[in-house]
Image (cartoon, rainbow, N blue to C red):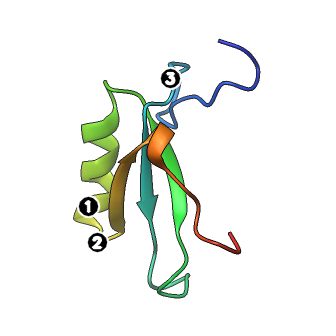
Amino acid sequence: MTDETPVCSAKGCRAAAVWVLAWNNPKLHTPERRKTWLACEEHREHLSQFLGVRGFLKDVVRFEEWQAPEGA
């Protein structure tokens, strides 16, 4: 890994990111806005569930396939 290698967003995890979890808090963000968390294989399900139970999770995409929305 290098300093530029994206890492997992799970607390304390320094593993390489494999997944992008796109989410939105409707109380704070406009409907088209997407915030992102990165996840390694180990933490993808946990982070997805955390966002999902709150109704925030919008999409889960492999990191290499992720394209940020225009204007992000």
> Height in image: 10 above or below 22?
above
Residue for badge 1: 52
Quadrant where the N terminus is found in the figure: top right
How far from the left and from the top, in percent, is residue 29?
55, 82
Report if the CB atoms under discs 3 and 2 are less than 8 Å apart: no
Q: Nearer the viewer, residue 57 or 5?
A: 5
The outermost residue toward the top is: 1
Q: Residue at x 33, y 64 (%)?
A: 57
Q: Residues within 10 Å of mark 3 (few under 14, many from 20)?
A: some
Mark before the other along the chain sequence, 3 or 1: 3
Q: Residues within 10 Å of mark 1 (few under 14, many from 20)?
A: some
Report if the CB atoms under discs 2 and 1 are less than 8 Å apart: yes
Mark before the other along the chain sequence, 3 or 2: 3
Q: Which mark is residue 13?
A: 3
Q: What amino acid is labelled 1 in the image?
A: Gly
Q: Residue at x 72, y 15 (%)?
A: 2
Badge 3 element:
loop
Q: Nearer the viewer, residue 23 or 68?
A: 68
Q: Residues within 10 Å of mark 2 (few under 14, many from 20)?
A: few
Alpha-carbon distance for marks 3 and 1? Answer: 20 Å
Quadrant where the C terminus is found in the figure: bottom right
How far from the left and from the top, in percent, is residue 64?
49, 38
Badge 1 element:
helix
Q: Nearer the viewer, residue 9 or 61?
A: 61
Q: Residue at x 52, y 22 (%)?
A: 16
Alpha-carbon distance for marks 2 and 1? Answer: 5 Å
Q: What amino acid is labelled 3 in the image?
A: Cys
The outermost residue toward the right is: 3
Residue for badge 2: 55
How far from the left and from the top, in percent, is residue 19?
41, 39
> Height in image: 38 above or below 41?
below
Q: What amino acid is labelled 2 in the image?
A: Gly
